[in-house]
Amino acid sequence: MERLEVALSAVLYLTRWCSVIGWSRSQRICVITLAEAHPLLQSGKTIKNINYQISANCSRLQNKVSGKSKRGAQFLTELAPLCRISSSDGEEYTIYSCIRGRLIEVNENILSNPALLQEKPSTEGYIAVVLPKFEESKSITQGLLTPKEYEEVLMKRRSSAL
C-alpha cells in the first residue's frame, strides 16, 4: 500500500490509555496510534517486540485489500485486537481497534523499527488504518476531541491521580 499521508484533523480518546484514533474527514479513515498517556510512552520502557499475529488463525499481516470497495479487508469490531506489544521489562500490551470497520493497512515499518511507536507515535509510528462503515462515520465524528480537548482530559486524569 502507498505510504500513509494524512493530515489528521482531530483525535478521539477512546480508552484509558490504549488507543487514539486520528481522523481524516476528507478520506473517512481512522489512524490507530498509541495514546499519549499509554504506559509505553510514559514510563521510559523499551519496546522489544510487536506482533500482529492475533491467534493461530488470524494475522493482521495477512490482510489483503483491493479495489475501491476494499475487498478482502478484515472486518474489525471495537474489541478486536490489532497487535500485541512486548516491552523489555516483560509487560505485554494488547492494542485494540476501538472502532468498527475494515482494516485497510497495518504499519509493517514498526516491526523492523519498534522505536517509531515511541519516537513518532502520531505519524510514522501509527499501528493501523481502519475504514469505518459509512453509516457509522457521523457517530464517530461526533465523539471527536480536538488536540486541546484531549490534553484537558489528560490533565484532569493526572490531577485526579494525585
Image (cartoon, helix red, strand yellow):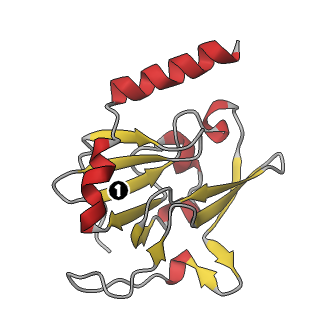
Between 147 and 91, the one lying in front of the other is 147
The x and y percentages for residue 128 are 45, 62
Q: Nearer the viewer, residue 75 or 109?
A: 75
Q: Is residue 83 above or below residue 117?
A: below
Residue drawn at (24%, 82%) of the image:
69
Compared with 119, 100 (above or below) is: below
Q: Quadrant of the C terminus?
A: top right
Q: Residue furthest left?
A: 26
Residue at the spot 64% in from the left edge and 31% down from the top edge: 42
Decide: few, some or many residues near mark 1? Use Cα within 10 Å; few <14, some 14-19, many ≥20.
many
Mark 1 = which residue?
30
Give the quarter of the figure containing the N terminus: bottom left
Q: Nearer the viewer, residue 19 or 84?
A: 19
136 above or below 11? Answer: below
In which quadrant of the rendered view does residue 12 lie?
A: top left
> Could you tell me residue 4's position as x and y percent?
30, 60
Tell me which amino acid carries mark 1: Cys
- Residue 18 vs 60, above or below: the answer is above
Q: Position of residue 113 (x, y in %)?
A: 56, 57
